[in-house]
Amino acid sequence: MTTWLSRILDKPVWDPQGTQVGVCLDVLVSEVGQGLPPLRALAVGEKRGTPRLIPAESIAWLSPSIILKTATPPPYEPKKDELWLRRQVLDRQIVDTEGRRVVRVNDLQLARTNSHYCLAGVDVGGLGLARRLGVENAIVKALKALGRELPQGVIPWSDVAPLEADAPIIRLRVSRDKLSQLHPADIAAIVSELDRSTGQALLTTLDTPTVADTIQEIEPELQVSVLESLPPEKAADVLEEMDPNSAADLLADLQPTQREQLLDLMADEDAADVEKLLAYPEDTAGGIMTTEYSTIPAGLTASQALAHLRQSPAAREDETMYYVYIVDEAGKLRGMVTLRELVMAPPDMPVDQMMVDNPVTVDPLTSQDEVARIVAKYNLLAVPVVDEEGVLHGIVTVDDALDAALPTAWKKRLPRFFRV
């Protein structure tokens, strides 16, 4: 037997003799991490005044009428890990990781199992809202006459768990694991739909790499707010996980004291990469380049080059490895080759015979507009950034080169393959 929270709230509560003892003001459940959280107590009283808590063991029926087993039920003392359904869940938001969206709790389903009542599900659909408004039957009949049905929107509570007992958000039970498996752009969209405190609370449940990827997908004006909401140590960890150019852009928008504090907390190598980028104007090749790229020394065969890349820490950080750059002992750029060419070449073929000897390059102070023109002209996925002596300092990927020309929304439509 099932019923809905909306059908018992503010309804009379009767003792066994038929005397009204008040109305149901709220429902308390525990073990909210379980599939069917048991009902622990009802808050019973008048709409004004302090209610008393009646333990679930004293409830004979919830529907169609709320009837107690005794006229003198013992008091109930609430515990910290329990949840008030009306006050803490109803009308709150949940993250539907299946639908990759934020939805609202319109009603809650209660069920009776083995003489005990429990919380069974969450109604996030229009039918739940119609039920709350008291027009469910009328709407169902009207739609039926039109040959249509109002879709059900019930999520089993087995897929729902509270973020915190007092937090204004309820999230799907598997959100920590399942939400982390969503594309960062989907997580960013979810966070953007939530209010600031709720979105920040949701991010705190995710691991550092996921937070880093998500921040990079959030609109720039919100990135600073999200980063500032994190403890400094956590924020530094997130910056370390971000692409150096993205981290540099974000740090550039912070106050100098905040920027220095976070740089001090970052690992030396990561901080050095970011500081290197911060030294250049934002609208130059040096300001938009990334220091994550793959290199191999000159003089290798194709098989030796692939073996080198497998062991290279820098190559492991290169998420969009497409071009591989050949450098000499001084770090000067000798040429470049595509990863496809390396993989498809005969194992004993020298890389020098397949590489582009004089690749198109830009210097660190080349304007972003000029970099974009070069990338478009030569149909490049990335262009290397070298100094006057030909030393390779970084690469500018196509999305960062075109950032000035493309709206942010268009840029985010580029496949992840093209985005560092």
Image (spheres, helix red, strand yellow):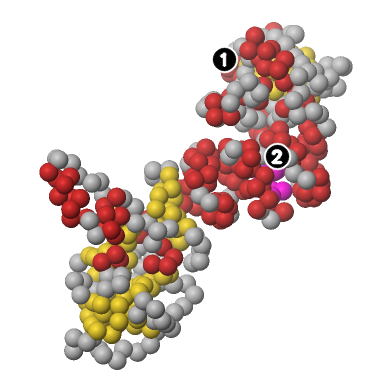
Q: Image quarter for residue 416?
A: top right
Q: Which residues are magenta?
A: 235-241
In the picture, the disc for residue 250 is 2
Q: Is residue 140 left or right of residue 193?
A: left
Q: Which tag, 1 or 2, sits closer to the chain's start?
A: 2
| The residue positioned farthest toward the bottom in the image shown | 72
Residue picked out by circle 1: 344
Most common secondary structure along the magenta stretch: helix
Task: Provide residue 205's location: percent of width, then percent of height.
Answer: 55, 55
Q: Residues within 10 Å of mark 1 (few under 14, many from 20)?
A: few
72 shown above or below 125: below
Kind of residue at badge 1: Met
- At horizontal 70% and vertical 23% (from top left) the residue drawn is 396
- Residue at 34 percent of width and 56 percent of height: 106
The residue that appears at 20% across and 50% down in the rendered structure is 139
Q: For numbered disc 1, what is the local secondary structure? A: helix
User: Residue 334 location in percent, x, y?
Assistant: 78, 14
Label 1, label 2: how many angstroms apart (C-alpha)? 39 Å
Q: Tell me, yes or no, whether the highlighted magenta stretch contains residue 237.
A: yes
Q: Note whether residue 394 is visible.
A: no
Quarter of the view holding residue 382? top right
Query: What quarter of the picture does the C terminus occupy?
Result: top right
Q: How many marks?
A: 2
Q: Position of residue 62 (x, y in %)?
A: 24, 74
Q: Which quarter of the image is occupied by the N terminus? A: bottom left
Residue at image coords 52%, 37%: 185
Please name which of the two marks, 1 or 2, marks the residue nearer to the observer.
2
x, y percentage for residue 243?
A: 67, 35
Is residue 152 inside the magenta stretch? Answer: no
Q: Amino acid at mark 2?
A: Leu
